[in-house]
Amino acid sequence: MSNNSASTGETAAATQDVDHSIEVGHGNSPAAWTTVAVMLVGAAISCVGFVLGKEATVLFIVGVVIMVLGLGVGYGMRAAGYGVGGSKLKNDGH
């Protein structure tokens, strides 16, 4: 039994609402790059803590806290004008 007609109808409806002429702006900004870098460091620390086991629970929690702080750093930098289209950037698009 096949659901091709149902899945085709849903896919067609979903693609009709997308406007591909608008540039997405993939987060090319100092705020986005800093957020990703800080969160990657936190994730690496958490992974090491997870692999080391029960004795390294504190290390795991420290990594999670660093990831949450990375989000805060990103929001702060965006508010300071370093996000996409921010006032502190001279951005020509790429």
Image (spheres, rainbow, N blue to C red):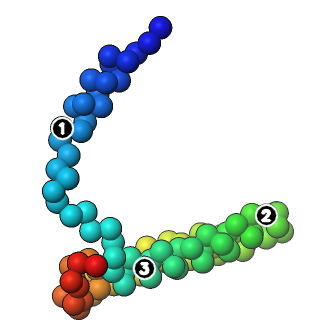
Residue type for callout 1: Gln
Residue 7's spot in the image, x, y percent? 35, 24
Of 63 and 24, nearer the camera is: 24
Do tag 1 and tag 2 residues touch (Cβ < 8 Å)? no
Question: Circle 3 sits on which residue?
Answer: 33
Residue type for callout 2: Val
Question: Of marks 2 and 3, which one's residue comes earlier in the chain?
Answer: 3
Question: Circle 2 sits on which residue?
Answer: 51
Relative horizontal placement of residue 11, taking residue 56 as reference (left or right)? left
Question: Of marks 1 and 3, which one's residue comes earlier in the chain?
Answer: 1
- The relative height of residue 85 versus residue 3 in the rendered view (above or below) is below
Residue type for callout 3: Trp
Disc assigned to residue 71:
none
Question: Circle 1 sits on which residue?
Answer: 16
- The relative height of residue 16 versus residue 61 in the rendered view (above or below) is above
Do tag 2 and tag 3 residues touch (Cβ < 8 Å)? no
- For mark 3, give the secondary structure: helix
Relative horizontal placement of residue 53, taking residue 16 as reference (left or right)? right
Residue at 22%, 31% (x, y): give it.
13
Do tag 1 and tag 3 residues touch (Cβ < 8 Å)? no
